[in-house]
Image (cartoon, grey):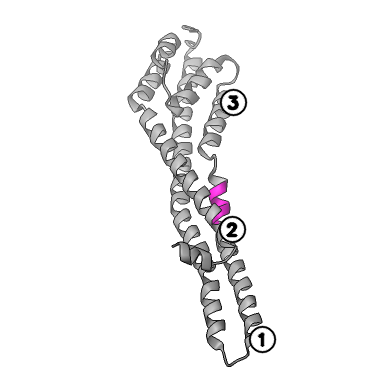
Amino acid sequence: MVEIFIKGGPIMYPLLFCSILSLTVIIERSIFWYMKERARNQPLVDSVLELARHGNWDAIKNKVKGSKDYVIRVLVSGILHREFSMTKAMEAEASEEIKEMKRYLILLDTIITVSPLLGIFGTVLGIISSFEMLGASGIEHPQAVTSGIAQALITTAAGLGIAILTVFPYNYFHSRVEIAKLTIEKYATSLEILYEKLIQQGTVGGNQG
């Protein structure tokens, strides 16, 4: 591997940086989503909505203490600001949660785009160098040219390899963000409907909590 890396020329160094950066982000995001999944507490979400159905805000406040579930945090934000604007409060909290989930994905997207371009750039430089060798050595030594082109193609292979191995985790993390968005929207809408029903029934102020 070291020999191949050296043969690839100077462009292999930025490609190496891209691969290290990609691997670091993939590991960090994998840990992030593992922790997010562990923090999810669906029974608690259902319980919060059931208590909200009866306007029992004090019970909700006590029940959700210490929860790190992102859905719970969005719902609680709406509940705490229900007398002002429940919808806007939940939208603001959801925006912060989604922003955290999308963190570093732009780096993976950039690596997917840049790595193949760096690889092609390295190959072009290598081919230019090979033709310069052809001009210096003449047609009687074609092996020098073909060897140079073969080495030049190493950067293209490396760039494509990095992009291919990065695109799968990127798409997975992106899909997790989209699923989280839909989940937040689902339960936030449910809470809004329950609160509007309480307002219509005139029982919303029964327990201010």
Between marks 1 and 3, how big is the CA–CA gap? 69 Å
Q: How many marks?
A: 3
Q: Residues within 10 Å of mark 2 (few under 14, many from 20)?
A: some
Considering only vertical position in the picture, is 83 above or below 20?
above
Depth check: 147 or 118 in front?
A: 147
Q: Position of residue 192 (x, y in %)?
A: 49, 24
Residue that badge 3 annotates: 88
Considering only vertical position in the picture, is 104 above or below 149?
above
Residue 174 in view (yes/no): no
User: What secondary structure is found at the residue carrying circle 3?
Assistant: helix
Comparing labels 1 and 3, the label whose residue is closer to the camera: 1
Q: Position of residue 41 (x, y in %)?
A: 36, 26
Query: Label 3 sits on what residue type?
Result: Lys
Which mark identifies residue 114?
Answer: 2
Residue that badge 1 annotates: 135
Is 111 covered by the magenta stretch? yes
CB under 8 Å between callouts 1 and 3? Answer: no
The residue lying at 51 percent from left, 76 percent from top is 150
Seen as rendered, the residue at the extreme left is 43
Q: Quadrant of residue 38?
A: top left
The residue lying at 53 percent from left, 45 percent from top is 105
Side (left or right) of 157 relative to 62:
right
Comparing labels 2 and 3, the label whose residue is closer to the camera: 2
Residue 138 in view (yes/no): yes
- The span shown in magenta is 107-112
